[in-house]
Amino acid sequence: MTWLFANLENLRSFESNPDQYVPAFGGFCAYGVSQGYKAPTQIQNFTIVDGKLYLNFSSYIRRFWLSHQKHLILEANRNWEQVKGEKPITVTFTQIWFKYQFYRLFKIPFFPKMED
């Protein structure tokens, strides 16, 4: 992995605690891991929760993630050991967009049940 820094101060901050900057779930979509698979991400779709960086596949997924992140983080943490050795899935933005629209229209969650 290649790390780029805007200045020397940022590099030194990173060097003092590099684990703080490593994204959760190997940089794969945190929502995807919560659903039991590894999906790619876009760097602009991120959230920091309790000092941990979570990445998401798309802005649609990030919106959903923000609404349900407590539950989704728990599910992703439960799934990560099983999922991390698997090959990432191939998915298109169109597929995710339709899934998100289905959720918005019918309020059927992406996952079977939500418990807080």
Image: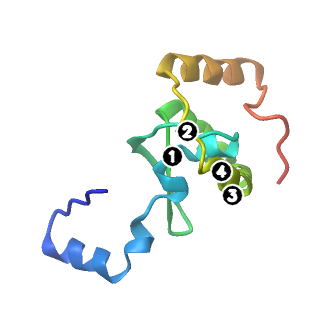
Q: Position of residue 60 (x, y in %)?
A: 53, 31
Disc 2 marks a residue whose amino acid type is: Lys
> Mark 3 and 2 residues: CB-CB less than 8 Å, in contact?
no
In the rendered image, which residue does mark 4 sit on? 69
Question: Which one is in front in this view, the residue at disc 3 or the one at disc 4?
Answer: 3
**105 horizontally vs 49: left or right:** right
Measure the alpha-carbon separation of dots 3 and 1: 13 Å
In the rendered image, residue 50, in percent from the top left (x then y), is placed at 56, 68
State which mark lies toward you, 3 or 2: 2
Q: Which of marks 2 and 1 is nearer the N terminus?
A: 1
Q: What residue type is labelled 4?
A: Gln
In the foreground, 97 or 80:
80
Looking at the rendered structure, the secondary structure element under dot 2 is loop
Residue drawn at point x = 21 percent, y = 59 percent: 4
Q: What whole-number distance in Å separates the C-alpha atoms at marks 3 and 4?
A: 12 Å
Q: Depth-wise, is mark 4 or mark 1 nearer the camera? A: 1
Q: Which of marks 3 and 2 is nearer the N terminus?
A: 3
Q: Where is residue 5 in the image (x, y as percent from the top left)?
A: 20, 63
Residue where numbered disc 3 is placed: 77
Q: Residues within 10 Å of mark 3 (few under 14, many from 20)?
A: some
In this view, the mark in front (2 or 1):
2
Q: How crowded is mark 4: few (under 14 residues within 10 Å), some or many (20 or more)?
A: many
Q: Residue at x 16, y 62 (%)?
A: 6
Q: Mark 1 points at which residue?
A: 28
